[in-house]
Amino acid sequence: MDGGIRDSERFAALIRDHAGIARKVATTYARDPDDRADLMQDILANLWASWPRYDNARPFPTWMTKGQMMDIDALKAALVSLDDRDGEIRLPSTAAARKARRSVAAAAKWQIIQAGTGVIIALAGGLVWSDLPARPGLLFASGLLINLLGVAMIALGVAGFTHAVRIDVAAPIVETEAHMARLHRIKLVSGWVLGASWWVLWLPFMAVAVRLLWGADMLAPIGISAWLITTLAGGIAGWGGMWGLRRWAFRNGRMHLATWMDDMMTGRSFREAHRRLDEVARFAAG
């Protein structure tokens, strides 16, 4: 092909004529319809990237199947999308945008799940402490703490969902990054404050569960000093240990461990959404 010039119209015409080959490969390697669509886009991306090196003397189907379709490293370019509804080839960044939208939707979904879980926890704690207003004690305090934890989960879940649904992959990068930054802060608070608070609240949570399931007060034999020591010591040891382990992992190059801990705190769906949006930003930058 002269000087590596890409004849997009001819490429699109050839792909329409021989798209069945790519579909067959995608169907072989992916059963899920969404995965199949993504793989189809990646195959076409690889073909488009290799198109300048196409030799007109070779039959196009042979060129497609001789190593051009399944170069996995080149699939990451994702420059081409096939729309099965009208048979048109769209260039260049629709695949990256589609994956970004899906990742952002997943991040929003997990915020809904967090808020829903918070409703259940808040109701559980509220049922316990509201039943003991005349004789407040350790069980009353446990119910109140669990109730407040649930309310905080609801508030942060709703706030995170609000920013997640405002993320538009077609919007200016500055606007998108602003919403992602706010969502990141919310996820960090949810992870390191609410998530790590379970190291402190595991005993109150167990007390609430036992009260609701069996009507018993497991804290009755425990004095307030023992209750405070148990919860605070567990919280300091657990939270401090996690934070210290994360710092050690970063300082000693254990990035796999550090990334795993960040995923656990901020959620893998958030990191995936951020990565996909970065891909869209690179495409937009040319």
Image: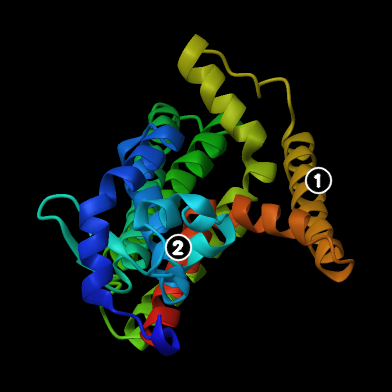
Amino acid bearing label 1: Ala
The residue that appears at 46% across and 48% down in the rendered structure is: 148
Location of residue 137 in the rendering, given as x and y in whole percent from the top left corner: 58, 33
Real-space Cα distance between discs 1 and 2?
56 Å
207 w.r.t. 113: above or below: above
Location of residue 276 in the rendering, given as x and y in whole percent from the top left corner: 44, 66
Q: Quadrant of residue 104?
A: bottom left
In what quadrant of the picture does the C terminus appear? bottom left
- Name the secondary structure under disc 1: helix
Q: Which mark is residue 233?
A: 1
* Nearer to me, 66 or 76: 66
Q: Which residue is mark 2?
A: 46
Location of residue 173 in the rendering, given as x and y in whole percent from the top left corner: 36, 84
Seen in the image, is 243 located left or right of residue 116?
right
Residue lying furthest left = 86
Residue lying furthest right = 252
The residue that appears at 43% across and 77% down in the rendered structure is: 52
Q: Quadrant of residue 125?
A: top left
Tag 1: Cα neighbours inside 10 Å, few (<14), some, or many (≥20)?
Answer: few
The residue that appears at 82% across and 49% down in the rendered structure is: 237
Whether residue 181 appears in this view of the structure is: yes
